[in-house]
């Protein structure tokens, strides 16, 4: 496992602050950020990892081989390297990076496998579902409401049906908000409240705590041996490259009322099905 001593994996549901955290860490000189190598439409082999749940520590599968290439810094495309210094392909020079930050938004179900199969530390970012859903609606990525990858995996379908009496194959009548809530539950409730905890070094970090208290960031730096940039307190709350133009981080305006009573009922209905205690309900 020593070959991955420079690595940190960051996972989290889309719009949970993973871009902000990974970019903040990767501002440090010679820290290499690999951005969403599981993106199925932007990366040639992203489909191998996208929304996948791998239970068995199989070291022969195509997904394992792809992960090994990622962690060895041998996978490159404009999407993965978008935050890298690509002059003379310096981001691929093996002796330059002091740290590798690998950031995912569709690999929460894979995080435990990556942590155990490769021994790489994991930061699991979590953000309250109401803010996540509001931001996801604004971003309007079509894949967010596509449950096809989840419903095609029989072990995952069986787990959800047996544990929560919910059929992932019968979601055609769900509203957009219900589908977004369902994705949030699959990506957070299952790894954090259903499966066994991460075996190796990890932290589950709430976006709300991290954003409002820089000491939480400093604690992460100590725990994961991360060196923050010198002027971190000045740049800490600056928007990431993926922050929406209408985000209150950019506009500096107070948030508007996000969901009405009917919409909250839809969200809470799915949260109740999955019996989550990660965040209190809003009414």
Image (cartoon, rainbow, N blue to C red):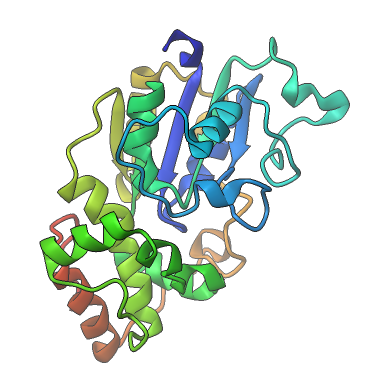
Name the residue nearer the viewer: 146 or 83: 146
Give x and y (percent) for residue 22: 52, 38
Give x and y (percent) for residue 173: 34, 89
- Residue positioned most to the right: 88
Q: In the picture provided, is 70 more to the left or to the right than 273? A: right
Q: Quadrant of residue 203?
A: top left
Q: Residue at x 33, y 80 (%)?
A: 171
All told, the count of numbered labels is: 0
Image quadrant occupied by the C terminus: bottom left
Q: In the picture provided, is 26 more to the left or to the right than 182? A: right
Q: Residue at x 67, y 33 (%)?
A: 75
Give x and y (percent) for residue 232: 53, 30
Q: Residue at x 19, y 35 (%)?
A: 197
Image quadrant occupied by the N terminus: top left
Does any portion of residue 258 appear in the rendered image? no
Q: Residue at x 60, y 28 (%)?
A: 69
Q: Quadrant of residue 66?
A: top right
Name the residue nearer the viewer: 204 or 151: 151
Does any portion of residue 279 appear in the rendered image? yes
Give x and y (percent) for residue 240: 58, 49
Q: Quadrant of residue 242?
A: bottom right
Name the residue nearer the viewer: 69 or 122: 69
Residue 230, compared with residue 85, is above or below; it is above
């Amino acid at each position: 496992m020593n070959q991955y001593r420079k690595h940190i994996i960051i996972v989290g549901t889309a719009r949970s602050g993973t871009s902000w955290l990974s970019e903040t860490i990767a501002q440090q000189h010679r820290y290499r950020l690999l951005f969403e190598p599981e993106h199925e439409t932007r990366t040639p082999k992203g489909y191998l990892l996208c929304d996948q749940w791998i239970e068995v520590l199989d070291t022969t599968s195509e997904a394992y081989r792809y992960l090994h290439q990622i962690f060895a810094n041998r996978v490159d495309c404009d999407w993965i390297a978008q935050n890298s210094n690509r002059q003379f392909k310096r981001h691929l020079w093996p002796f330059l990076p002091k740290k590798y930050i690998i950031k995912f938004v569709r690999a929460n179900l894979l995080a435990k496998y990556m942590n155990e199969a490769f021994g790489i530390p994991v930061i699991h970012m979590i953000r309250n579902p109401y803010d996540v859903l509001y931001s996801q609606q604004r971003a309007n990525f079509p894949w967010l409401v596509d449950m096809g990858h989840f419903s095609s995996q029989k072990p995952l379908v069986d787990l959800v049906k047996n544990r929560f009496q919910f059929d992932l194959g019968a979601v055609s009548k769900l509203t957009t908000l219900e589908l977004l809530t369902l994705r949030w539950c699959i990506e957070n409730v299952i790894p954090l409240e259903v499966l066994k905890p991460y075996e190796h070094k990890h932290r589950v970090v709430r976006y709300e705590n991290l954003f409002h208290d820089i000491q939480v960031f400093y604690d992460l730096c100590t725990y994961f041996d991360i060196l923050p940039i010198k002027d971190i307190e000045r740049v800490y709350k600056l928007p990431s490259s993926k922050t929406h133009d209408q985000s209150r981080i950019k506009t500096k305006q107070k948030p508007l009322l996000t969901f009405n009573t009917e919409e909250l009922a839809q969200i809470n209905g799915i949260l109740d099905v999955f019996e989550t205690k990660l965040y209190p309900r809003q009414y």
